[in-house]
Image (spheres, coloured by chain):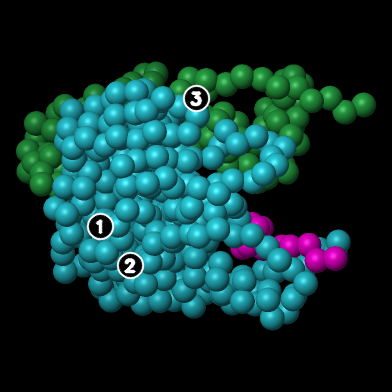
Chain colours: A green, B cyan
Amino acid sequence: MRLTISFTLDDEHDYKIVRWLRNLPRGEKSKAIRDALDAHLSGNVTLGDVYQTVKEIERKLQSGAFSAGAGLVEPDGADDFERENPDIMDALRNLGK
Amino acid sequence: MNLGLDLGYSAVKAVAGPRRMITFPSVVGTPDKARFSINGTEDNIILKTDRGTKQVGEGAVLQSRFQDRPEDRAWIESDAYHYLMLAAFTELTTATSCDLVVVSGLPVSFYSDRDLLRDRLLGEHRVAREGRRAQLFRVTDARVIPQPFGALVAETLNDRGKIVDPDLAAGVVGVIDVGGKTCNLLSVNRLTEVGRETSSVSVGAWDAARALRDYLTEHYPKLSLRDHQINDIIVKRQMSYEQEPVDMGAVVDTILEPMADQVIAEASQLWNGGASLDAILVAGGGALLLSPFLKRRFPRLRVVDDPVYANALGFWRFAQMLT
């Protein structure tokens, strides 16, 4: 039997979901939602989850967020960089002026 | 609220936070509506202003009898541009009154129009979106930067507007921004544009879509496909015809390769082969399509995270840094 179930979203809090739903091709929303719920209920790790995690690690490695013997650190060398490179920061702040 | 606004010829992308990103087709049309709708009309953007009532985005593509699609430089002075801007604002917030700091971009070849665009963005904008209370947006500050700078800034700054990639910030970087109708090439040294190494090429992702549509019309006359279906074929390199799968890889390559060759020729000439660049970034809606071909010439090239939204995200992060 075919069931139709409605649910509510907040356009600000649930923005990621709203965006995802809006970008789905017409006629394919229900299948995509079923697949996502099924993956969640099965506790499956999706290829999308793995990809997101790999991209996050790659980005943090590139930004020097990991250091030997330490855990995750915020790239707060940003303040040092800004102090040591006033020309770059001026160029950035004046962009489009 | 800080807002990054990337108003492209083919699509509008806007960002107001790490989880607040929207996009819709850059189409403005008459406010015609379907008489019957199974899915409801909550996705339709119908805006009423003192200039009239218009439908924007996907609703305009599907339902408007008359549509306005941007094609030229004077577009930023048009009513259509104004409606697209307002549609982006209303997509990002339902607040009835909202102060905004907006950062937007222009193609590098039109960058001299930045004051014109800045003046259009600044000030009060009133709009009533169908199904909502009227909204007032006050743009208190606006910056207009070269479009591909957005992607570079997105890679260089974090969501708090802090430098997270000092190498990119201090390096010599080439950015290839493959948009819907133009491809911008930007060279930056220590976050300052190198003017003589910056240019644009009149090719974009929509040229590929148009070429494929022409091919399909000639070889598969029974097919009638919408724009997003054409784009799907380009991305998946496959389609279905009379319930049989058809490999479109060779056709897609035949379309994309000459486009990529044009970009490679211009970039090679501008950047003298690219050997002196510390990094080459590719962004824009056509980044994933052209990058395999561009990599043959520039092996160190990399596609930025979320290339479609990269410029808008960079604009927003830039606004975060300024405020």
Tell me the chain of label 3. Answer: A
Mark 3 to mark 2 CA distance (whole Å) = 33 Å
Q: Residue beneath label 1, please?
A: B77
Give above or below for A24 relative to B115: above
- Residue at x 56% of width, y 74% of height: B211
Q: Which amino acid does label 3 sit on?
A: Asp
Dividing the image into 4 quarters, which one contains the N terminus of chain B? top left
Q: What element carries label 2?
A: loop
The spot of residue B110 in percent (x, y) is 23, 63
**Which contiguous range is marked in magenta?**
B229-242
- The chain holding disc 2 is B
Tell me: residue A36, above or below residue B38.
above
Using residue B156 as the reference point, say whether residue B38 is left or right of it. Answer: right
Q: Which chain carries label 1?
A: B
Q: Is residue A17 magenta?
A: no
Rounded to the nearest angstrom, the CA distance separating label 1 from label 3 is: 30 Å
Single out the residue that lies furthest toward the bottom: B218
Give the crowd class for mark 3: few <14, some 14-19, many >=20 residues within 10 Å: some
Whether marks 1 and 2 lie on the same chain: yes
Residue drawn at the location 48% of the way across and 59% of the way down: B67
How far across and how far down the image is residue B76, in percent?
27, 57
Q: Which residue is denoted by mark 2 in the rendering?
A: B72
* Residue A58 % position (x, y): 45, 37
Q: Which residue is drawn at 67% across and 44% down?
A: B35
Does residue B189 appear in this view?
no
- Say which quadrant the C terminus of chain B sits in: top left
Amino acid type for the residue under numbered disc 2: Asp
- Is B97 left or right of B48, judged from the image as shown? left
How many residues crowd mark 1 within 10 Å: few (<14), some (14–19), many (20+)? Answer: few
Residue A11 bears which disc, if any? Answer: 3
- Left or right, B317 with reference to B287: left
Secondary structure type for disc 3? loop
